[in-house]
Image (cartoon, rainbow, N blue to C red):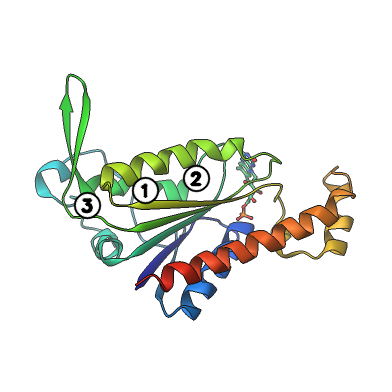
Amino acid sequence: MHVLAFSGSPRRRGNSSLLLAEMLRGAREGGAEIEEIIAEEVNVKYCKGCLRCNLLKRCAIKSDDWLELSQKILIADVLVIASPIYFHHLTASMKKILDRFRSFLHVQITENGLIYIPWHEWKKDFVLILTLGSSSDADAQPVIDLFKYITTILGPQNKLRTIVGTRLAIANQVKMNEEELRTLYPKLKLPAILAEKDYQRNQILLKKCYELGKELAEKV
Ligand SMILES: Cc1cc2nc3c(=O)[nH]c(=O)nc-3n(C[C@H](O)[C@H](O)[C@H](O)COP(=O)(O)O)c2cc1C
C-alpha cells in the first residue's frame, strides 16, 4: 500500500501539514509505505499549455522532476492533497502540480463538451485535507467540487474523501490546547468562549485524520 501525500502549505507547522501528519501517522501504523512531497519544494514547472500531452501520452516538459513524480502518482494507491484555502482555492504551489495532471488524460473537444480518456487505469483513494480561516466551510467548496470533477474524469473507480478544518488561522492552531485557544481568540477578535468547543472539535479532527490514514492503509 503506497501513500503519496502532497503538502501544499508554505507553513511547515501549518494546520493542513499537522492534519496531514496525523493522517500519515495512522497510515504508517497501518503498515503503509509513505512518501510526502512538499509542493513548494518539488521541482515541477508550470504547465505550458502546449497540449502536446494529448499526442505524447505524457507531459512534454522534460526539464523538471514531473516524469519521476508522475510515475509515483501512478503507482500510489492513495493520493493525499493537504492544502490551506487561499482565496477559495488551493495554494499556488499545489495548483501548479495539479495542472500537470492534464498530461494523464486525452481530452477530446466535442460540440457537447469535453470527453476525457485517461491514459492509465485509475483506481485510487484520494484524500483532500483542507484548512481555512473562516468559521464556515463554504470557501472550501470550489476545491471540493474541483476534486469531485478531477477524480471522476481520471476514472470512475476513484474514491474521494474530504476533511475540512474551519476557524484555523494561526500556524499550529489545530494542536493548541484549550488554554492556548482562550488566549489566542481575543487577539483574533473571536469570543474566548468558543475555545472549549473548538479544542474538542480540533481533537476530533486530528483523530479523524489519524483514523482515516489507518483505515486506508489496512484496506488491502
Ligand atoms: C493568501 C491567503 C488567502 C486566504 N484565503 C482564505 C479564504 O478564502 N477563506 C478562508 O476561510 N481562509 C483563507 N485564508 C486563511 C487560511 O486558509 C488559513 O489560515 C489556513 O488554516 C492556513 O493553513 P496552514 O495553517 O496549513 O498554512 C487565507 C490565507 C492566506 C494567507
Where, by quadrant of the figure, is residue 14 drawn? bottom right
- Residue occupying image coordinates x 16% and y 50%: 119
Please, what is the three-letter code of the amino acid marked with disc 3?
Ile
Work out which residue is located at the far left of the displayed protein and give it.
55
N-terminal label among 2 and 1: 2
62 vs 89, left or right, is left
Q: CA distance from mark 3 to mark 2?
A: 23 Å
Q: CA distance from mark 3 to mark 1?
A: 15 Å
- Residue occupying image coordinates x 71% and y 58%: 202
- Residue occupying image coordinates x 49% and y 68%: 213
Q: Is mark 2 within 8 Å of ligand 1?
A: no
Q: Would residue 192 be seen by someone viewing this image from the given angle? A: yes
How many other residues sit within 10 Å of disc 1, few (<14), some (14-19) or many (≥20)? some
Disc 3 element: loop
Q: Is mark 3 within 8 Å of ligand 1?
A: no
Coordinates of residue 27 in the picture (x, y in percent): 47, 73
Please, what is the three-letter code of the amino acid marked with disc 2?
Leu
Which label sits on residue 98? 1
Please, what is the three-letter code of the amino acid marked with disc 1?
Leu
Which label sits on residue 30? none
Of discs 3 and 2, which sits in the foreground? 2
Q: Which residue is mark 3?
A: 61
Coordinates of residue 104 in the picture (x, y in percent): 22, 49
Of discs 3 and 1, which sits in the foreground? 1
Q: Would residue 172 be seen by someone viewing this image from the given angle? A: no
208 vs 103, left or right, is right
Residue 214 position (above or below residue 80): below
Which label sits on residue 90? 2
